[in-house]
């Protein structure tokens, strides 16, 4: 059974354990609807300060490798379920890049996990999921851990 309701789904992943739950949900929705999935990871270059140069290239390579591994997990899960997955690696501020990708690529749904931070942690650090939910024109499914 396929549906035209979801044709393109972004599964945003940071490689965390909670992201794995979001991947499972996103892949299942894609399987039921016949949607194509984009496994998306954003290398947070925003947090790499412009003035910090010592070891910056090495840290970037580590972050890139982590991102490649995170999107590969989405691809593996998709292949096991017969869902087409395209791996996407972007750079910048995570919430902005997720929203921009979704709005510029005809995405019908964004699926992502959250660590469920509350109180002071959320106030001080912010939450990528929260920022995406608040600012995206595309529907967002947030999967709690």
Image (tube, grey):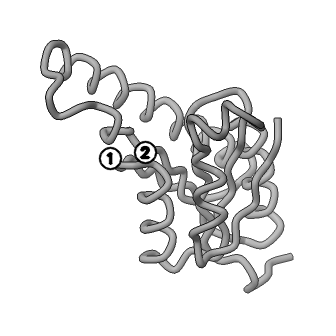
Q: Whole-percent x and y of residue 72?
A: 52, 37
Pointer 1 local density, CA inside 10 Å: few below 14, some 14–19, many at least 20:
few
Quarter where residue 52 is shown: top left
Quarter where residue 100 is shown: bottom left
Residue found at x 77% / y 62%? 31
Q: Whole-percent x and y of residue 9?
A: 63, 66
Look at the numbered disc 2 and give the secondary structure of its residue: strand
- How many numbered badges does the structure rendering display? 2
Residue of label 1 = 91
Q: Whole-percent x and y of residue 83?
A: 67, 57
Residue of label 2 = 42
Q: Considering depth in this image, is 98 or 69 the residue closer to the camera?
A: 98
- Tell me, yes or no, whether the two marked residues, 2 and 1, touch with CB atoms within 8 Å: yes
31 vs 106, left or right, is right
Look at the numbered disc 1 and give the secondary structure of its residue: strand
Instruction: State whether residue 48 is above or below residue 26.
Output: above
Q: Whole-percent x and y of residue 10?
A: 59, 60
Residue found at x 34% / y 20%? 62
Numbered mark located on residue 142 in the image: none
87 vs 128, left or right, is left
Instruction: State whether residue 45 is above or below residue 17.
Output: below
Q: Distance between the residues labelled 2 and 1?
A: 5 Å
141 vs 127, left or right, is right
- Mark 2 or mark 1: name the one nearer the start of the chain: 2
Q: In which quarter of the image is the C terminus?
A: top right
Quarter where residue 105 is shown: bottom left
Instruction: State whether residue 127 is above or below residue 141.
Output: above
Pointer 2 local density, CA inside 10 Å: few below 14, some 14–19, many at least 20:
many
58 vs 124, left or right, is left
């Amino acid at each position: 059974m396929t549906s035209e309701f979801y044709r393109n789904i972004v599964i945003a992943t940071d490689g965390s354990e909670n992201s794995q739950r979001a991947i499972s949900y996103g892949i299942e929705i894609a399987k039921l609807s016949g949607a194509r999935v984009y496994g998306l990871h954003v290398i947070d270059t925003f947090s790499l300060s412009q003035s910090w140069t010592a070891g910056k290239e090495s840290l970037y390579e580590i972050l890139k490798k982590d991102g490649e591994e995170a999107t590969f997990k989405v691809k593996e899960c998709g292949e096991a379920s017969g869902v087409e997955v395209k791996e996407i690696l972007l750079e910048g501020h995570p919430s902005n890049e997720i929203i921009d990708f979704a709005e510029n690529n005809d995405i019908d749904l964004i699926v992502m996990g959250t660590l469920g931070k509350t109180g002071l942690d959320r106030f001080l650090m912010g939450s990528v999921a929260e920022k995406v939910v608040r600012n995206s024109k595309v529907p967002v499914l947030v999967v709690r851990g």
